[in-house]
Amino acid sequence: MLTVKHLDIAVIGDEDLVSGLRLAGIGRYFMIKGNHDTGEDVRKALSELINEPDIGVVMILEDYVEYVNDLVAHVREGRKITPVIIEVPSKFGTKYKDVVGYYKTFIKAAIGFEVEI
């Protein structure tokens, strides 16, 4: 029989995203303040989270992915299943013109088949 391992969800984001997800029960988070070291702070946070074995999903603010594209690509191309890194749009909107298409492609790449809702 397979054992089920409990994995946590973590978030890397600004104050609004982190506060909202903490209210929803997310316990592992990095709140990035708008300062001159944003890229370095995001890189440090994601590096720490991808090396933790109990983290299954990392939600990261879409605006911050530009600072860690190489790390995200490395995780997504790796043979490990976890963590799954999900880009979350900011309160100002998303950078993707076809959001539905983006997430369909992301889900298909992650699990191997399309999901229709």
Image (tube, rainbow, N blue to C red):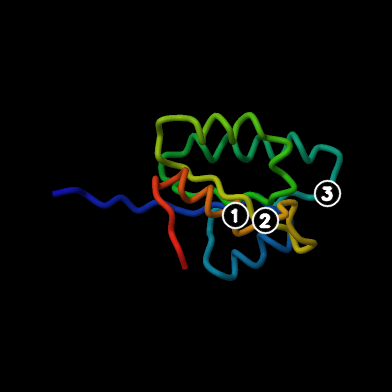
Where residue 54 sits in the image (x, y, percent)?
Answer: 41, 45
User: Which element is circle 1 on?
Assistant: helix
| Foreground disc of the pair 1, 3 | 1
| Foreground disc of the pair 2, 3 | 2
Q: Amino acid at mark 3?
A: Gly
Where residue 81 sits in the image (x, y, percent)?
Answer: 40, 40
Where residue 103 sits in the image (x, y, percent)?
Answer: 56, 54
User: Which element is circle 2 on?
Assistant: loop
Q: Amino acid at mark 2?
A: Asp
Residue at the far left: name it.
1
Which of the labelled discs sits on residue 98, or is there none?
2
What's the CA distance linking mark 1 and mark 2? 5 Å
User: Which element is circle 3 on?
Assistant: loop
Say which residue appears at 53% left-offset and 58% top-offset.
27
90 displayed left or right of 6: right
What's the CA distance linking mark 2 and mark 3? 28 Å
Question: Where does label 1 land, which residue?
Answer: 101
63 displayed left or right of 102: right
Residue at the far bottom: name it.
23
Which of the labelled discs sits on residue 34, or is there none?
3
Of marks 1 and 3, which one's residue comes earlier in the chain?
A: 3
Q: Amino acid at mark 1?
A: Gly
Look at the image and tell me whether residue 28 can be seen: yes
Say which residue appears at 54% left-offset and 53% top-offset.
28
Q: Are marks 1 and 3 in contact (CB under 8 Å)?
A: no
The vertical placement of 33 against 90, above or below, is: above
